């Protein structure tokens, strides 16, 4: 902070004289340096506690707000609560004489020489503050915790709220249970396991998350991207040179943990994640450069006001509670005019504190209904929410019920067609192991995951050092029933002979005369599109090339008639 003499330096001589006159000091000389010296000595002697008793209530509140916050507040935030201090040059000051009719408590304190303004460097860049000089602050007991210390404490705090319900400005009113609501689930655990399974087979890439939808319980690519980022930040996967992800050794520990313990680990990872919810709110479009937001502060602001029990509350009430207690949670400088955020419906930019509900309010709604729902933290209706039992345990710092015991091993089922069925709620590490030698199939049953053994999946396993003998041993130990004889023999044959048969997508070309096939085989424009003969009057054509063959044949004077089910 600054001393009085430094603070007064920024004032024009006319304001120095006004302040002096207010305190009955006769300082009308032209020597600014001498004026500052005498004025700072006089102001330092003020009995401020006594002077506050004679100030109007709003001015006194504004001054004590500064005292209680360690002596400084961003100008934008202070102005929003206590009014602006109009900027005027010396000529305008002489003409307008604003000290005779101050338009706000802030302006009244300004011309009394009780508050000052100045710039300081912060993590948000250069920010202008309203502040109290050191000589003023020393006249008051220090606040319990300064603003900077409060921020540091928040970074290290536990999930438990530091503001008790009795201290809150608004009270959360409990609701009755909605007639219909979406219950919290632990699908995030199963989907994260699926992503790890796909990663170990080389099929997980940020650019292809849309392809993951058939394999996931949650059918939202944004949710998949969110989970992938958490797994990456937890060091459970890492990205390699070709852009795909691979699981790390740390993934094994997470896969072997109990479901609630694993879910709580994801909760904790989300608290520190760089995943930026503001950039995913459907009603908002973040544009431009030169500004950024802290992705962590919104979720901390929300968690700080959450109830600690199983009761239902309206999300709008949570929004209003945050607005009353911590409105600047993501804009600590109090400036609401520098971010470029557009309303996706109207196309208008949302600027100023009056747009708080449209930006901050919608962000809180999105966090409840998306990340918190994806993680299984809340039951939710369109307008209300309540904490899931797992979330209550985590929020109240209670140990996960299954933290001391690994998940019970469950038996898998393998049928005569080479399909392996793994129970959804079973051992996740066991399912991960199945994914090393069998290909995951799209999810059709919420109770099981299905995998198919193929030559390609066995080849991939072999590349990872997993022999067919190890596959058979694993299946014998993990399966509820003996391995079907045909599947056992098929795996052994693959080990001996490699790929003996394959299925391919082909189009069959049938002709009325064998001479037509001879022409097509011999001509350089068409012969590269033909594959195996299927008799004298038929031949296979790759499905992806039949239209090229159609065009080339037409150039030779032969029109092919495509089947009705082939794409145009």
Image: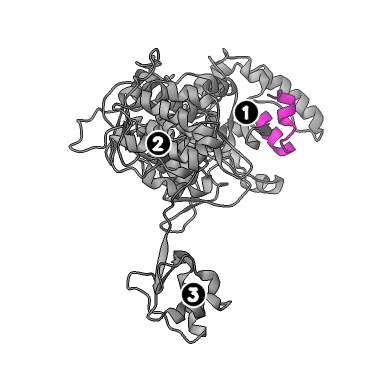
Find disc 1 in the rendering and name its residue. 131
Label 3 sits on a secondary structure element that is helix
Q: Main secondary structure of the magenta part?
A: helix
* Disc 3: CA contacts within 10 A as few (<14), some (14-19) or many (>=20): many
Counting every numbered tag in the picture gives 3
Find disc 2 in the rendering and name its residue. 191
Query: Where is 308 relative to 420, above or below?
Result: above
- Label 2 to label 1: alpha-carbon separation: 51 Å
Label 2 sits on a secondary structure element that is helix
Label located before the other in sequence (3 or 2) = 2
Label located before the other in sequence (3 or 1) = 1
Label located before the other in sequence (2 or 1) = 1
Q: Which mark is residue 359?
A: none
- Label 3 to label 2: alpha-carbon separation: 43 Å
Does the magenta segment cover residue 213?
no
* Disc 1: CA contacts within 10 A as few (<14), some (14-19) or many (>=20): many
Q: Are marks 3 and 1 in contact (CB under 8 Å)?
A: no
The answer to whether residue 353 shows anywhere in this view is: no
Quarter containing the C terminus:
bottom left
Q: Are marks 2 and 1 in contact (CB under 8 Å)?
A: no
């Amino acid at each position: 902070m600054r001393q009085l003499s430094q603070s007064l330096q920024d004032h024009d001589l006319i304001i120095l004289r006004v302040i002096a006159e207010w305190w009955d000091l006769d300082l009308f000389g032209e020597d600014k340096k001498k004026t500052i010296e005498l004025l700072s000595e006089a102001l330092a002697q003020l009995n401020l506690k006594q002077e506050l008793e004679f100030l109007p209530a709003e001015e006194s509140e504004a001054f004590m707000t500064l005292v209680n916050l360690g002596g400084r507040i961003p100008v934008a935030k202070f102005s929003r609560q206590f009014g602006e201090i109009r900027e005027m040059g010396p000529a305008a000051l002489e003409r307008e004489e604003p000290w005779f009719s101050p338009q706000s408590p802030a302006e009244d304190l300004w011309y009394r020489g009780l508050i000052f303004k100045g710039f300081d460097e912060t993590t948000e860049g250069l920010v202008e503050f309203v502040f109290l000089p050191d000589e003023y602050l020393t006249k008051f007991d220090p606040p319990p915790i300064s603003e900077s210390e409060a921020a540091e404490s928040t970074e290290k705090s536990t999930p438990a709220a530091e503001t008790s319900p009795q201290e809150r400005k608004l009270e959360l009113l409990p609701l009755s249970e909605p007639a219909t609501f979406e219950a919290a689930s632990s699908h995030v655990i199963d989907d994260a396991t699926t992503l790890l399974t796909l990663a170990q087979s080389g099929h997980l890439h940020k650019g292809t998350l849309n392809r993951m939808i058939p394999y996931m319980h949650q059918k939202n690519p944004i949710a998949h991207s969110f989970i992938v980022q958490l797994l990456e930040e937890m060091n459970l996967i890492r990205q390699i040179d070709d852009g795909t992800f691979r699981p790390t050794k740390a993934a094994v520990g997470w896969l072997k943990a109990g479901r609630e313990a694993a879910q709580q680990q994801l909760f904790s990872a989300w608290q520190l994640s760089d995943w930026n919810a503001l950039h995913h709110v459907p009603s908002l479009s973040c544009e431009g450069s030169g500004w950024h937001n802290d992705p962590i502060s919104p979720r901390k602001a929300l968690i700080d006001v959450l109830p600690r029990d199983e009761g239902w509350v309206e999300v709008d009430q949570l929004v209003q509670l945050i607005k009353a207690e911590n409105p600047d949670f993501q804009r600590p400088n109090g400036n609401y005019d520098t971010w470029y955020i557009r309303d996706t419906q109207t196309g208008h930019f949302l600027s100023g504190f009056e747009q708080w509900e449209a930006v901050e309010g919608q962000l809180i709604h999105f966090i409840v209904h998306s990340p918190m729902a994806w993680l299984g933290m809340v039951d939710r209706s369109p307008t209300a929410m309540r904490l899931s039992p797992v979330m209550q345990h985590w929020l109240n710092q209670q140990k996960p019920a299954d933290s001391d015991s690994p998940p019970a091993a469950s038996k898998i089922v393998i049928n005569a067609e080479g399909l392996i069925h793994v129970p959804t709620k079973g051992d996740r590490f066991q399912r991960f192991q199945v994914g090393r030698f069998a290909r995951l199939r799209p999810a059709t049953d919420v109770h099981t995951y299905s995998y198919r053994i193929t030559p390609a999946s066995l080849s991939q396993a072999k590349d990872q050092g997993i022999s067919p003998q190890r596959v058979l041993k694993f299946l014998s130990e993990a399966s509820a029933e003996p391995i079907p004889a045909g599947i056992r023999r098929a795996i052994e044959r693959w080990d001996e002979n490699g790929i003996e048969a394959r299925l391919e997508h082909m189009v069959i070309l049938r002709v009325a005369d064998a001479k037509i096939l001879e022409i097509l085989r011999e001509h350089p424009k068409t012969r590269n599109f033909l594959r195996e003969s299927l008799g004298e009057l038929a031949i296979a054509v790759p499905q992806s090339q039949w239209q090229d063959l159609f065009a080339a044949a037409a150039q030779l004077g032969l029109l092919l008639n495509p089947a009705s089910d082939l794409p145009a």
